Amino acid sequence: MSLEPGVVVELDPIAERSARAVRPFAATEPRARAAALVAVADALDGHAAELIDLAMRETGLAEPRLAGELRRTTNQLRLFAEVIVDGGYLDARLDEADPAYVIGPRPDVRRVLEPLGPVLVFAASNFPFAFSVGGGDTAAALAAGCPVVVKAHPGHPELSRRTAAIVTGALEASGMPDGVFQLVEGEAEGVALLRDERIRAAAFTGSTRVGRLLAGIAAARPRPIPFYGELGSVNPVYATAAAVAAEPGLLSGFLASVSGSAGQLCTKPGFLFVPEGAPLDDPGELSPPAEHRLLYPGIGRAFEERRAAVLGAEGVTVLVEGSVRVDESEQRFATPTVVEVGVEQLLAQRDALLEESFGPLSVIVRYRELGRLPELHRELFPGNLTSTLHATEADAPAVAPLVEALAETSGRVLFGGWPTGVSVTNAMQHGGPFPATTTDSTSVGTAAITRFLRGVAYQDAPQALLPAALRDDNPWGVPQRRSAAGRSAGWGTLTGEY
């Protein structure tokens, strides 16, 4: 990727259109903006067969996976439409003027969350719908009232263009302002826009190397901007001896999670820790999944190199050798590879083993002492999207310190099950401490909208100049948290009123 500041790309019209759309879009009545998101969802569903066919051809992902992903994408848009209409995301707070306020006379202060401005979204390769042109970052930014410019991923260019055309058409038909949504292609174009002062935030899903470079550009601007990068995660899984005994299908569930979508998922379990001597199913007796094409040649080559590094590490025992086949187009087709090491070998070979293997490869680690796992986890896995624990009720006291370590270092802690599959809900957290993300927030679920909002307080403002969400007549009908005069005298009585 070329990141030199001297690259000149003519993108001024795109940035200018996006900047001009900021105020009109922010002022759009919530139900109209919500209806526009629903129109986008309906339009994408209406072209489902065409879009899925394009995605299959460009990414090698299977039809059932893509159909489910498109369904997730369109319903995510509908969920954000409900968030807009509810209005709670604006966090409107109204403090009445109070001359008797205990800290000193209080003016009339009203605070609301307002859109940041134009958002640049770098589309991902492994989710051509859900984290691409019309995916979660785009949905959250549009819901927040921010114009969006999407930098298309080169792994599925035709799909990106067609999706963008459908999204643009639906927004225009819904009466949204010109410039609310635009698409660009090319690495230089994306970097140039990231440096453009009219872009006020950026979101990225991809490799740690590229994410860190882009985050550095965002931070080094004369006016730095928020950069929400989802980078890499190895998503460790821990199982107690009792859980292994109680779950005869533990290994088959693990392999299914590792091999789903050829392991090209940010939540794929990269490590499974099980006690020494705990019996697992014989991997040779499990039905191996069919080979699966990796997304594009670049990812295929990177996986091939990582697999060779893991297989060549000292002390590694191969449980499932797997394979990688290369065709005449340089596409790689892989089956799962699983190796086993002890804790001491993992520590000794950490340079070769700890890096994320983006593809169908995982490491089983045999441990001796359950009590050592919290310290080991903090040392080896400081930031993850997910961590998982398989344990029984009787294990609870013994694993409590491990759960604390998992919560400190992970965005989502699972008890049982497998981390692949991220539900789009109000309570979902899809983020985590670095290196899982550059900024610990969520890119999935309704809380993702907060990334593209900023607080503004209005003091002693006349009603006619207040944003609609802060006016006494509340024309948008949003929830308002009102602090009436005189309440401060009761502080400390623990009434919960302030």
Image (cartoon, helix red, strand yellow):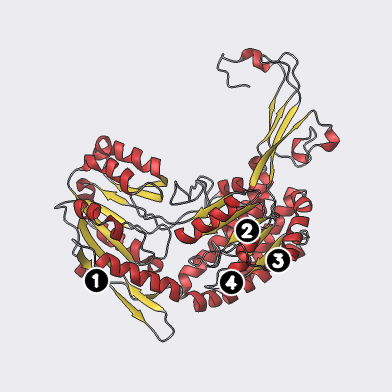
SS category of the residue bearing label 4:
helix
Q: Residue at x 76, y 61 (%)?
A: 17
Mark 1 highlights which residue?
321
Mark 3 highlights which residue?
11
Q: Earlier in the sequence, mark 1 or mark 3?
A: 3
Q: Is residue 30 left or right of residue 256?
A: right
Q: Earlier in the sequence, mark 2 or mark 3?
A: 3
Q: Earlier in the sequence, mark 2 or mark 4?
A: 4
* Badge 4 amino acid: Ala
Q: CA distance from mark 2 to mark 4?
A: 31 Å
Q: Which mark is residue 21?
A: none
Residue that protrudes farthest toward the left in the picture: 277
* Badge 1 amino acid: Glu
Q: Is residue 460 left or right of residue 157?
A: right
Q: Nearer the viewer, residue 331 or 287?
A: 331
* Badge 2 amino acid: Leu
Q: Which mark is residue 194?
A: 2
SS category of the residue bearing label 3:
loop
* Badge 3 amino acid: Leu
